[in-house]
Structure formats: structure tokens, C-alpha cells
Amino acid sequence: MRIDLTPLRTSPDFRRLFLAGTVFYLGGMVSYVALPWQLYHLTGSNLAVGILGVIELVPLVVFGLWGGALADHVDRRKMLVGSGLAQVVFTACLALNAALPDPHVWAIYVIGAFLSAAGALQRPSREALVPRTVRHDELPAAVALSSLGMQIGLLGGPALGGILVETVGAATAYGIDVVGLLIATALFARLKPYPPAGESTPPSLASIAAGARYAVSRRDLLGTYVIDIVAMFMAMPTVLFPALAKDVLESPHILGLLYSAGTVGSLLVTATSGWSSRVHQHGKAVVIAALVWGGAVAVAGLTRNIWIVVGCFAVAGAADMVSGIFRSVIWHQTIPDSMRGRLAGIEMLSYSVGPLGGQVRSGLVADRWSVRTSITSGGVLCVIGVVATAAWLKDFWSYDARTDRYAVAERERRAARGED
């Protein structure tokens, strides 16, 4: 049950990726809290805060796809360092603006968009680099460890950001993020070069389209995207947490518990993920985890007991992490290195679109009927949708890493390059 630390012991470059990624998430979540906090204090408008999310979404989509194409054509270490330095500069600009006697609201929107673009450019290279730094059989452990670093940031970052903005202000919060970004970028700079392993395709709309065609042509990959989109679109109740705490549970003080329950469940899974390396039927694991997610959300909407609700969301978060681990393992163990960056960009879209659409669905149903109806119906629809998807994509349900032709081919390619 203990988390497998083998990749941290055997691979210096994976250690650097793990430490840098953890620092990036931790610092990034500080700014994630500081940006809307500062906007609301400057404008007093929830709409102004919401507009920031819309502005950040466009560069996330565009530069996520372009960053994936770049990751397949250039040295991924250079991509990490260059995009990291860009984030340092943009976050420093946020700090300077916040330090002004009258900070400019327009500057927050503009810099926020540039910061979103830089982060979107970086992530495909970071994700695509993981398989190059560890052995093929270490990938499940490497995925779990990377998830652990993310969870540390998701748990600690918002709490640290909330304390900082209320005590020392947004400018200092941004400044601390700048320090963290500098440390992480320095760790990236210590990686060895990672140019394309073979022939590469220059980034273009055509190369992005080729990546999309490849993803759709493989039913096992299609299953990882569709299952996650269905689960998140049908059963994403986060937007309802304020109303759930205040109007349904009549306990506004537990709002923080609702938000953190899922992350705690995820962290428990990653901290006890040693078993994941012994699971080979990853498609079944993803489907079952998605069913547990939907079932837990549905039960949460049926009760007014605070602790059952919090427990259900913790179980849902744990199931989501199980799904995430095995979806990532499928990606890393089967996608050729020449396509991995572009597919990482597509993955960014798959786990961004579902939650965004799910928040809209949850809000509409809650306004039309009730909060509890929205939560429970979403969980039930999730279970139905996941079962239907698994029945449609039978190749995904029967996926086995030991026999899947893409996994076998990737193992053989790595062995031929002397990487295993």
C-alpha cells in the first residue's frame, strides 16, 4: 500500500521534475487565490472575477494545443525553462501592479491571459517528459508520485495564498510565487537535454490535426477522454458547494470542508498507491473508478448529514485520482514519443472541457429544480453515461497493458533505444 518511491531513487531527472512540479503547483495556487481576491477587492464585482476565467480559457486552449506541437519538435528542457522564465516575468508584473497605489484592473486581465498562455505552453512538455525520465515499468509509480506533488500544491497553495492575501496583501503573495517559479525553473535547467527521440514534425495546424486524428483512431485513448468528459460533465458539483453548505446543510462554516474533501481523498490514494503497479487492466480500473465517482456524488445529494456528504466527496475525490492515475499510465505507456506532446495538449482539453460544462449543467439544474436534485441526478447520469461508454468502447474496457499492441510496441521501441 505504500507509495512506490523507486522513480525518485533511480532517476535524478525525475526527482527534479517532481520537485519543480510540486513548487510550481504550490506557487501557482497562491496566485490562483490572489488574482480573484485582488480583482474582487478592486471592483467589488463577482462578474469581474468571472470574466477573468473566460479570458484565461482562450489562451489555455490555443497555447495548450500549440505547446503540445512544440513539445514534439524542440528540446523539452528548453520549453520548460523558457516558459518558466515567462511565468516569472508575468507574475513579477502582477506583483508590481499590485504594489501600485491604484492597481490597474485591465493589467490583471492582460497579464492573467499571458500567464495562462505561458502555463499552457509548459504543461505538455512537462507531461510528455515523464516517460523519458523513468523506465517503462516505473511509469505507474511515476504517475502516482507526480499526482502526489500536484495534490500537495492543491492542498497547501490555496491555504497559503488565503493567509498571505489577508495578512500581507496580493503584491507579497505574487512575490512569493515569483521565488517559487525561479526555484522550479532552476531545477528544470538542471535537466539533461531532451530533444526529439527521432524524426519530428514542425508545429503547425496540420501537425495538431494529425495528433487529433491519431487520438480518435485509437479506441483505447478515446475511452480515456470520453469517460473523463462524461464523468465530469454529468457529476461536477463544485459550483453548488456554497448553496449546499448554506441552504441545504444549513452550515456555512463547512464550506471549506466541502472544497477540500475531494483533495484529501485524492491525496490518500496517491499516498497508498503502491498497489497500482500491479494492476494491468487499466481500462476496467478507469471505468470502475468513474462509476464510484458518480455513485458517491449521487449519495451526497440524497442526505443532509454533513459528515456523510463530506465523506462522499472524499470518496469521489479518491475515485477520480484512481481514474487519473490509470488514464495517465495508458497515455505514457502507449503513445509514441513523437506524438506525446500533441496528445498531452489534447489531454489538457479533455480534462478542462468536462468540468467547465459540468459546472454549467449543475447550476442550470439547481436553479430549475433544487441543489440536491442537481447533485443526485448528475451522479446517476454519470453512472449511466459511463456504462454506456464502456459498452460502446469495448476495446477500452478490455485494455490490458501486458498484451495491448500499442503498449507492447512502445516497450519494444524503448528497449531498442536502450531506455529499459
Image: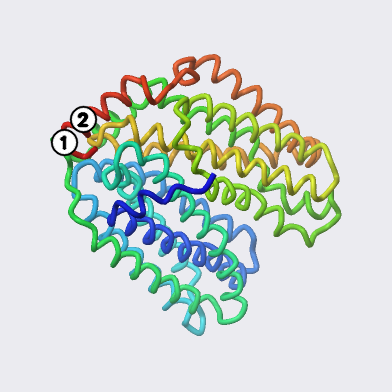
- Label 1, residues with CA under 10 Å away: few <14, some 14-19, many ≥20: few
Above or below residue 14? Residue 112 is below
Depth check, front residue: 8 or 369: 8
Above or below residue 49? Residue 144 is above
Is residue 4 rendered to the left or right of residue 254? left
Is residue 116 rendered to the left or right of residue 251? left
Give the tally of numbered discs.
2
Q: Which mark is residue 250?
A: none
Residue at the image point whose x is 24% and y is 58% from the top: 191
Give coordinates of residue 72: x percent, y percent.
Answer: 23, 41
Residue at the image point whose x is 43% and y is 76% from the top: 175
Asked whether the viewer can see residue 114, the reply is no
Residue denoted by label 2: 413
Q: Amino acid at mark 1?
A: Arg
Q: Quadrant of residue 233?
A: top right
Q: Amino acid at mark 2?
A: Arg
Depth check, front residue: 317 or 173: 317
Q: Which mark is residue 417?
A: 1
The secondary structure type at the circle numbered 1 is: loop
Give coordinates of residue 204: x percent, y percent.
Answer: 23, 38
Q: Residue furthest left?
A: 199
Above or below residue 287? Residue 352 is below
Q: In the picture, which quadrant includes the C terminus?
A: top left
Is residue 376 rendered to the left or right of residue 183? right
Q: Disc 2 vs disc 1: Cβ atoms closer than 8 Å?
A: yes
Give coordinates of residue 37: x percent, y percent.
Answer: 59, 68
**Separation of marks 2 and 1 at Cα, in angstroms:** 6 Å
The secondary structure type at the circle numbered 2 is: helix
